[in-house]
Structure formats: structure tokens, C-alpha cells
């Protein structure tokens, strides 16, 4: 498995501000992803964080709103920009390790509330 | 397009009862992976099982068992002798096999409440 930590674990933010969420893994991983889980809803993939290059975004998500960085094989950040109450969600980082290619492990999530 | 349907939004049972969570999927791929995850109130997602499309053997792990039926495109999850600690939201998910566990498509989840 993989030990994944996310910071912050939760935050309450004001409309119009931005928040950067960090994801740290205890070992090098092949793939890193960011998901959003809106209240009472399922998980939706935001993007694949690519090491050393621009992230690959899913339909409905854009880089200006959710800029992502992945400077190395164990760390990634997701920024939620110009927040509105509709951005209130749990944001989860997940990873796939080359040694366990068919298993995706999730971080503890960041619970964001936008007022 | 791939789709996962968990028709049961919420289930509530009394402790020690058996409970089955349904999962029906749609895919045009001949090879794919199916997953179950548990999300307790704390919010983290806990991996429970992965099954590939070529392996239709049912699996049992303690009180948990999974029934994979390709003929009906279902991958149901049964908890035997349920316990209060089983209370959580359970998600079924699907991915294309050649991508391993990448790009998971999740069902809407089933909220399971086990009452003492």
C-alpha cells in the first residue's frame, strides 16, 4: 500500500480566495490523481497530476480554476482558485504505485468549506 | 462510456443481519477492473477489493464476500453478521483494464447504517 498525507485536513475559506492543498506520499508512485467529492455525492476525477509537465484535466475542469503541480514522484499540490460556495467539497489525492499497478490508494482528504 | 450504478442510496439494518450492496456496471471494454471502497464517517477511502473481468470466482474475506456475474454485469458485495463498525458509505468503481487502476469511474455510493 502507500501512506498518503494531505494538508490541510480541513479549512473554511472566504469567497474569492484561493487554497492550495498538498499531497505527500511515503514512496515514489507512478500516477497521482485529484478527485472532488461534493457533499453527499460520489467522487469525480478532476485531473491526473503529471510529473514535470502540465496536468491532464477531465471534462468540466480547467487549469485556471484548479492549477496542479507535481514537482517530483512523491508530492503534488492542487489549488482551488477564486473560490465560491459551490467549491465546498472534499478533495482527495490518490496514487497508483508501479508495484501495485491495479490498486489506487486514496489520501485522507481535505474538507473545504467556502463561505 | 463507462457507468456504475448503485441503486440503493441508503440501507439500514440491525446488527448481526446480513446485507447485500448492489453494483451494476456498463462498459464496452472486454477487459476491465472492478473495485469496492469503504468511506467511513472520517472521510478517507479504504480499498476493499479489486476484481478483473476474467476472474468470475467469488471471493470471501472474513465477513465480506463479493459476487461477480458478467452475465448480468453485476458485482455485489455482501456483509455477513453486520457490525456497527461496518456503518459507512460504500462505493463501487470501474476502470479500463489496460490502464490498471487509473481513471476510476465511481457509482453514487450506498450509505449503510448498522443499528445496535
Image (cartoon, coloured by chain):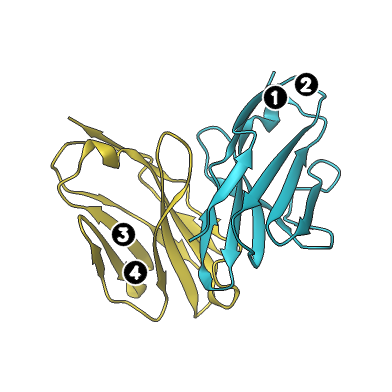
Chain colours: A cyan, B yellow
Q: Is residue A10 above or below residue B105?
A: above
- Which numbered disc, 4 or 2, marks the residue closer to the eye? 2
Estimate the x, y position of residue A44 in percent, counting from the top left: 61, 49
Q: Are marks 4 and 2 on the same chain?
A: no
Q: Are marks 1 and 2 on the same chain?
A: yes
Element at label 4 = helix
Q: How far separated are the C-alphas under marks 4 and 3?
A: 11 Å
Label number found at residue A85: 1
Task: Chain letter for mark 4, please.
Answer: B
Q: What residue did someone put label 2 on? A: A15
Q: Residue at point 48% right, 43% down?
A: B44
Q: What residue did someone put label 3 on? A: B76
Estimate the x, y position of residue B79 in percent, counting from the top left: 23, 51
Element at label 1 = helix
From the viewer's perspective, tell me whether residue A10 is left or right of residue B116. right
User: Closest to the observer: A96 or A80?
Assistant: A96
Q: Residue at point 77% right, 29% down?
A: A83
Q: Residue at point 81% right, 25% down?
A: A17
Q: Residue at point 65% right, 49% down?
A: A24
Amino acid at each position: 500500500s502507500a501512506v498518503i498525507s494531505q494538508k490541510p485536513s480541513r479549512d473554511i475559506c472566504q469567497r474569492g480566495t484561493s487554497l492550495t492543498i498538498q499531497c505527500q506520499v511515503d514512496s515514489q508512485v507512478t500516477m497521482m490523481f485529484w478527485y472532488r467529492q461534493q457533499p453527499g455525492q460520489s467522487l469525480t476525477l478532476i485531473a491526473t497530476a503529471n510529473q514535470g509537465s502540465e496536468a491532464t484535466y477531465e471534462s468540466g475542469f480547467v487549469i485556471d480554476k484548479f492549477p496542479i503541480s507535481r514537482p517530483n514522484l512523491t508530492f503534488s499540490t492542487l489549488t482551488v482558485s477564486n473560490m465560491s460556495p459551490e467549491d465546498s467539497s472534499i478533495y482527495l489525492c490518490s496514487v497508483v504505485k508501479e508495484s501495485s499497478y491495479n490498486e489506487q490508494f486514496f489520501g485522507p482528504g481535505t474538507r473545504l468549506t467556502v463561505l | 462510456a463507462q457507468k456504475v450504478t448503485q441503486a440503493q442510496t441508503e440501507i439500514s439494518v440491525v446488527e448481526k443481519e446480513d446485507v447485500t450492496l448492489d453494483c451494476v456496471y456498463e462498459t464496452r471494454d472486454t477487459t476491465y477492473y472492478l473495485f469496492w471502497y469503504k468511506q467511513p464517517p472520517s472521510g478517507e477511502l479504504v480499498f476493499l477489493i479489486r476484481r478483473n473481468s476474467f476472474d468470475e470466482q467469488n471471493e470471501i474475506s472474513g465477513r465480506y464476500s463479493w459476487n461477480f456475474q458478467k452475465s448480468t454485469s453485476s458485482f455485489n458485495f455482501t456483509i455477513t453478521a453486520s457490525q456497527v463498525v461496518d456503518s459507512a458509505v460504500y462505493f463501487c468503481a470501474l476502470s479500463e483494464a489496460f490502464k490498471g487502476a487509473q481513471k476510476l469511474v465511481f457509482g453514487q455510493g450506498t450509505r449503510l447504517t448498522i443499528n445496535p
